[in-house]
Amino acid sequence: MHHGPLLQYMQTLAGLSERAIIYEYARSHEQRPLVHMIITSAENHRTLEQIRQQHLLLADPARSAGVDISQMPVVVRLGYGVHGNEPSAHNAAPLVAYHLLASNSQEVLQMLDKTIIIIDPSLNPDGQDRFASWVNRHRSRILNPDPAGREFSDVWPGSRTNHYWFDLNRDWLPVQQPESQGRIKEYHRWLPNVNTDHHEFGANSTFYFQPGVPSRGNPLTPKRTDELTMEVARYHARAFDKVGQLYYTEEDFDDYYYGKGSSYPDVHGSIGILFEQAGTKGHRVETVHGVVDFSETVRNQVIVSFSSLEAAYDMRLTLLDHLRWFYLTGVEEARKLPLQAWVFGDNYDQGRNYHFLEMLQTHQIEVFSLKENLKLSDYVFKPGSSWLVPLDQPQSRLVRSLFEEVLEFEDSLFYDVSTWTLPLAFNLPYGEIAGARQLSAAKGDLLTSLPELAGSVEGGSSGYAYVFAWDDYYAPKALYYLQGHGLRTRVATQPFSMKMGNEERVFGYGSILVPVQMQDMDPARVFELMQQATNLAGIKAFAIETSLSSHGTNLGSSALVTLRKPEILMLVGQGTNSREAGEIWHLLDQRFDMPVSMVEVGRFNNLDLSRYNTILMVSGSYGDISQGGRESLDRWLRNGGTLIALGNANNWLERSGLAKIEFVKVPEITDPVMLPYADRSRHLGARRNPGSIFRAKLDITHPIGFGMRQETIPVFISGNTFAMPDSSAFANPLIFPENNLMSGYIFEPYRPMIENTAGILINSRGRGNIISFLDNPNTRGFWFGTNRLFMNALFFGPIIRR
Ligand SMILES: [Zn+2]
């Protein structure tokens, strides 16, 4: 079903019944409304706000002890279709809603009296519509179940993801997409006791429901959560036994990563349940179980929706008590730890600080200002650019999962990544406060709003030049705006300092100079553009009146290199990684207001490349690039193009002879001649790098490292693509030293494979450069540390000399 009719149906239902209300909580990128329908008895609807307030008290350890739960309703959230191409999920929502509103059976009436049901009928409306449009336009009058049919294989980028090709079922923690931003806010308004998350897996499977693999749970999730999930599971089992449906539990999937819809609830005193139905991916399909109709898959999603409701109703008091217990014990455990708080913040980059705080606030984490300078190891945290997160707060378990570095694991298999330590992803300095006295000395006021990113041109209008530092995350936004309006700009490849009034201000590597006289417009217009650019980016620029610096290079020196505006082409389509492409599209379009031409690989061979100076190749096979296409790319490079390649796009570049890269061979592990066959998948799975964080050494004097102040940077790596450093000492701006694992899992014998390898390599070709990122610097839109290096490659790629 398309999203429009689904929405209309749900709205009509809500309008006809006093048991339901419906409201919009967010808009997708394509402006489709995301809604929640709340279903409960008419009586409960009259006091809904009081019920909600009372319910939230359970999560407040300071006040929850006195709450009488005996008459309180349990809150259940049914979430359908986070993946657009799993249609049995969102097609189940209207059936469930209809039954709950229309039935006058004793069972339903009793349930509604003691249950608040929140239906989220479609978590990903943009993906849903892509899918509905695909299968419906390939539907024949006589349904053909041949699985080879076009109907069953949605073209690139598929419809699992949202508008920018993000997997929304990984975004519950990073919350970089509007669907998740609205959803998490709404989640905290209700803190449901049970959360369902309806999915589909392969057509030849049966049905799966949680609990997941016991040894693969997150250690911060209490065992009691798993036990209750199991208790709920018995209801699904009973319901499926009755209709003869095969199913399994506990042998697959896990809730280790809290960024998924079934695991985020686990760290919020709730029971999150993943459902996986064997999907038909079309109207009717042949499977190992015979021919299956789409309607049968919807039926199963409806059945587990009701078994979940039945369980919640029966277990009401246990579940309400669990919510209270979860938050009480969270605080108790936190108080036993020697650690009091984390302090974090970058003294030079308010953009990254802002996004970090935004994330903490979305998750209802208490953050405090810093009262005075705080020196921890070598770093001085300063009020205004540093903040405190105490552990003694209701969200303590979530806080620990966001800040802790994890190096010990019960299991070596992960359904998703093994770590997401947030300050590392943001490359923010952070430290621990261990003593209560130190904490009270440092702790200021509770943060209630985000700091404003105010832009300004200090010193007003200049007839000579303006300069701004490259420290702030949003400096590239200002630079692109100026370039886009035709201003000539230069970048400092050596630092300098200028006297500004009584102050001496240091401008580091990557500072941007905008001369006034060398432009094709008058000084008043230059000033106007400077004001607009700094406001847009929320950064400070400075008016200057001389080329003569007080220290370092002078502004007319050749150490200040003229820049060109990036004209960007990104290859997309069949055979390329849509996730990586989507992350770049989102990064440039949403954060930096930069256009990118996304061109199908199949068109590349005959494309005139002259209008682009930057080409992006995300991971992919690129088998469709012909010899002619390769030659045209080579000519374009020799003419001064900048090619930026991610992940295994580098394998293609190496094979095609355009770049010299020596990949590291995965070490051969000699197994005993015979191992138990039953352990096969576990044995092989343990070698997979699920995604871990490694320390890299960064050359901050290299254009790739411009704007960074620390010579190490955390890098996220998933997979086993590593390369030897180049023979030129200036072509390896990012190197992994020894002992580099910061957080996450790695198969022990693979450790040496990463040591002394290069994370970024520079190859040159005529006047052009190839910049190879061996992994993906833009993971899931929240790797604000390494995506700065990617932005540097875009702007400074052309000025790099090997
Ligand atoms: Zn799914």
Image: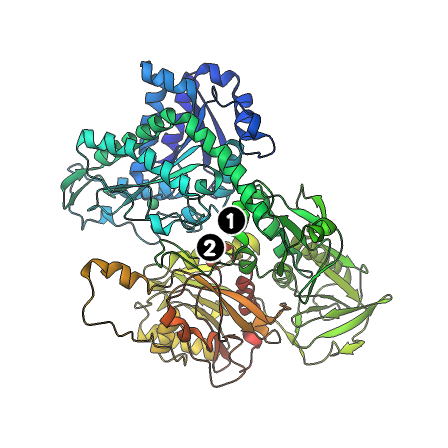
Write the residue at 18% across / 61% down. Answer: 677
Q: Quadrant of residue 141?
A: top left
Q: Amino acid at mark 2?
A: Arg
Q: Secondary structure at mark 1?
A: loop
Quadrant of the displayed image that contains ligand 1: top left
Q: Amino acid at mark 1?
A: Gln
| Mark 1 C-beta to ligand 1 under 8 Å | no
The residue that label 2 is drawn on is 780
The residue that label 1 is drawn on is 176
Q: Are marks 2 and 1 in contact (CB under 8 Å)?
A: yes
Q: Quadrant of residue 594?
A: bottom right
Q: Is residue 117 above or below residue 254?
A: above
Write the residue at 65% across / 57% down. Answer: 345
Dot 1 surroundings within 10 Å: few (below 14), some, or many (20 or more)? some
x and y, in percent, of residue 369 in the image: 70, 49
Residue 801 visible here? yes
Q: Is residue 162 above or below residue 582?
A: above
Write the residue at 71% across / 53% down. Answer: 438
The residue at the far left in this view is 290
Q: Please indicate whether residue 801 sits to the left or right of residue 107 in the image.
A: right
Q: Is residue 293 above or below residue 764?
A: above
Q: Earlier in the sequence, mark 2 or mark 1?
A: 1
Marks 2 and 1 sit apart, C-alpha to C-alpha, by: 8 Å
Q: Secondary structure at mark 2?
A: helix
